Image (tube, helix red, strand yellow):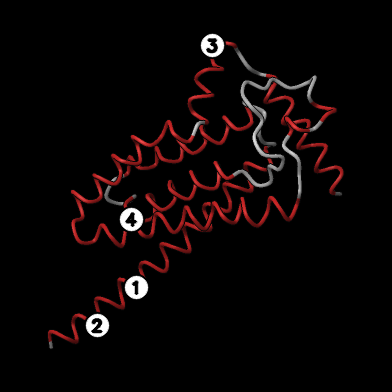
């Protein structure tokens, strides 16, 4: 069963990674680089502080906690536990793939990029989606970043899907805790006023 799943994952990876064009290489390198998105994160922090003032601290903590949990689950738990090599480190695949940058660490299951971007996109959607429907675009961003990891030969599709699932679950958990804390704080403040 696992061997069949691994073969399907490898076949899908080779198909996706094999559909490349030279003009897209630098774009995908830029998309996949973590530092490329710092201006977006700074803009997001500024918007939250401007729009939500005192509430921004709890909201930012929720976003940071979700990303930290997803990142550590993928990087510090699953990668050392599974020891699944990145496709760019598999000798039998190296002549078949299209790598466009340095391969990175040896292990790739699960994708931290996918975990982190989906955690952030899901948190934003759960917290603000009703008020700001355009935040659904966060998922488009997360999908593009996640796809870039396959494009640059750093991850298999299953690495990316698992990372995305971890990110969604981490976000859901952190938003749930934030809302419980918010409800508790609201009840506590009402008692103080009365």
Is the C-beta separation of discs 3 and 2 under 8 Å?
no
**Which of disc 4 and disc 1 is earlier in sequence?**
4
* 194 and 153: which is toward the camera: 153
Neighbor class of circle 4 (other Cα within 10 Å; few <14, some 14-19, many 20+) is some
Distance between mark 3 and mark 1 Cα atoms:
48 Å
Picture residue at 49% right of the left edge, 39% below the top: 142
Is the C-beta separation of discs 4 and 3 under 8 Å?
no
Task: Give x and y (percent) for residue 92.
Answer: 85, 28
Distance between mark 4 and mark 3 Cα atoms:
37 Å
Numbered badge on residue 27: none
For label 2, the residue is: 188
Query: Residue 73 is drawn in which quadrant?
Result: bottom right
Q: Secondary structure at mark 3?
A: helix
Distance between mark 1 and mark 2 Cα atoms:
10 Å
Distance between mark 3 and mark 2 Cα atoms:
58 Å
From the viewer's perspective, is the residue at label 2 or at label 4 nearer?
4
Is 182 rendered above or below residue 116?
Answer: below
Is 192 rendered above or below residue 130?
Answer: below
For label 1, the residue is: 181
**Which of disc 3 and disc 4 is earlier in sequence?**
3
Is the C-beta separation of discs 1 and 4 under 8 Å?
no
For label 4, the residue is: 60
Picture residue at 55% right of the left edge, 47% below the top: 115
Question: Does 189 sit left or right of 9 as displayed?
Answer: left
Question: Does 48 sit left or right of 192 as displayed?
Answer: right
For label 3, the residue is: 23
Is the C-beta separation of discs 3 and 1 under 8 Å?
no
């Amino acid at each position: 069963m696992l061997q069949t799943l691994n073969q399907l994952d490898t076949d899908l990876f080779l198909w996706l990674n094999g559909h490349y064009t030279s003009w897209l290489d630098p774009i995908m390198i830029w998309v996949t680089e973590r530092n490329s998105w710092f201006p977006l994160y700074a803009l997001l922090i500024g918007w939250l502080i401007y729009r939500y003032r005192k509430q921004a601290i709890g909201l930012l903590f929720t976003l940071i906690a979700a990303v930290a949990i997803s990142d550590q689950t993928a990087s510090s738990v699953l990668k050392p536990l599974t020891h699944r090599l990145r496709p760019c480190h598999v000798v039998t695949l190296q002549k078949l793939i299209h790598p466009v940058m340095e391969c990175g660490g040896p292990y790739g299951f699960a994708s931290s990029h996918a975990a982190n971007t989906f955690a952030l996109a899901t948190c934003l959607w759960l917290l603000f989606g009703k008020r700001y429907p355009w935040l659904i675009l966060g998922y488009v961003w997360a999908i593009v970043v996640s796809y870039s990891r396959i494009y640059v030969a750093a991850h298999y599709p299953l690495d990316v899907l698992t990372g995305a699932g971890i990110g969604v679950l981490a976000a859901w958990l952190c938003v749930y805790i934030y809302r419980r804390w918010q409800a508790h704080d609201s009840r506590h403040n009402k008692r103080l006023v009365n």
